[in-house]
Amino acid sequence: MSDSAARDRDAAESASAFAHPVVAPDRTAAYGHHPDQVIDFYAPRDGRTAAPLVVLLHGGAWRAPYDRAHVSPLADFLARRGFAVASVEYRRGGEAPGGEGSGGDPVAGRWPDTFDDVAAALDAVPALAARELPEADVRRIVVTGHSAGGHLALWAAARHVLPEGSPWHLPAPPPLRGVVALAPIADFATAVELGVCGGAVTQLLGGGGESGVGLDPGRTAQADPAALLPTGIATAIVHGEDDIVVPLAVSEAYADAAAKSGEVVGVTLLGDVGHFPLIDPAADACAIVAEEITQLAW
């Protein structure tokens, strides 16, 4: 496929994924005091109780214009498949002084706020879900996320691997059934090499190290999923073979790093699929995502 045809298809897939109306949650609860520190809860549409709980982390290159609203159709899709869903909002980039990144895009992420929020949200989910969504079985939690949210899902499952001095370190693995990462920004070195999302990884980490170039090694050690292995938590990746937003090579690099650490990460490749069908309820790829979650949850 030519570059022009690939871009045209990506635009069409993006338009389809973003064309669905926003689906209002059944309940929303705060896990902090900032307006972005909230979780939307969706009850299983079939009325079942003790439903597995899917924690959903949206993508958008950790940038402020993209919030949880764009994955609300996916949350509803999963709820219609019998899951309880907790869709997490978190602070993103673009609000800090200087606020614009390369190419005129808002800055990607806020250090350390983005990570503070994801850690706090995941810690709060069991209690909040028990209160707001009694249909959820908080003993069966699967974390999923798309693109930058896929990165955060992998990171959230690896907090026990963080250095003990990290503010996000957990003394034991989080009680998760597993992680399903959708086209995740999973390996920072590869993502930087490929220029994923207009330099988003470098912006997320606050720029280069002492030399002013490359990735800050201290922050990379705390934020790069490929540096936080093995996790001991069942992990699956779903990635479109024709993804030009987060190329497949990024997930392959993560899977290779996992293998070198002695851990097997399942990678499901979807032929003739780009970046956005994974979150598009109208696409066949979305049903495959639901099946991957089902395999870990039940």
Image: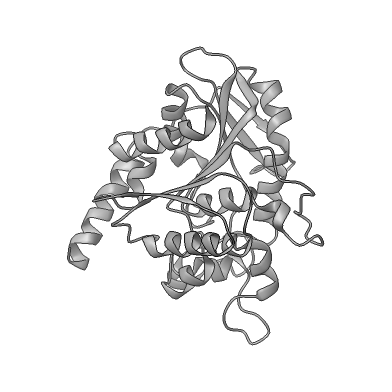
Image x and y of residue 63, in percent: 52, 57
The residue furthest front is 262
Which of the pair 82/174 is nearer the observer?
174
Image x and y of residue 146, in percent: 46, 48
The residue furthest bottom is 211
Which quarter of the figure is the N terminus placed in? bottom left
Q: Is residue 12 visible from the viewing direction of this image?
A: yes
The residue furthest top is 47
In the image, is residue 204 above or below residue 53? below
The way the protein has been coloured in the rendering is: one colour
Left or right of 216? Residue 4 is: left
In the image, is residue 297 above or below residue 276? above
In the image, is residue 272 above or below residue 144? below
Image x and y of residue 246, in percent: 40, 60
Residue sitting at x 65%, y 80%: 209
Image x and y of residue 292, in percent: 43, 37
Left or right of 67? Residue 18 is: left
Residue sitting at x 54%, y 59%: 258
Residue 260, image quadrant: bottom right
Which of the pair 157/135 is nearer the observer?
157
Which of the pair 164/205 is nearer the observer?
164
Residue sitting at x 68%, y 34%: 125
Q: How many marks?
A: 0
Which of the pair 269/91 is nearer the observer?
269
Residue sitting at x 63%, y 23%: 137
Q: Is residue 57 visible from the viewing direction of this image?
A: no
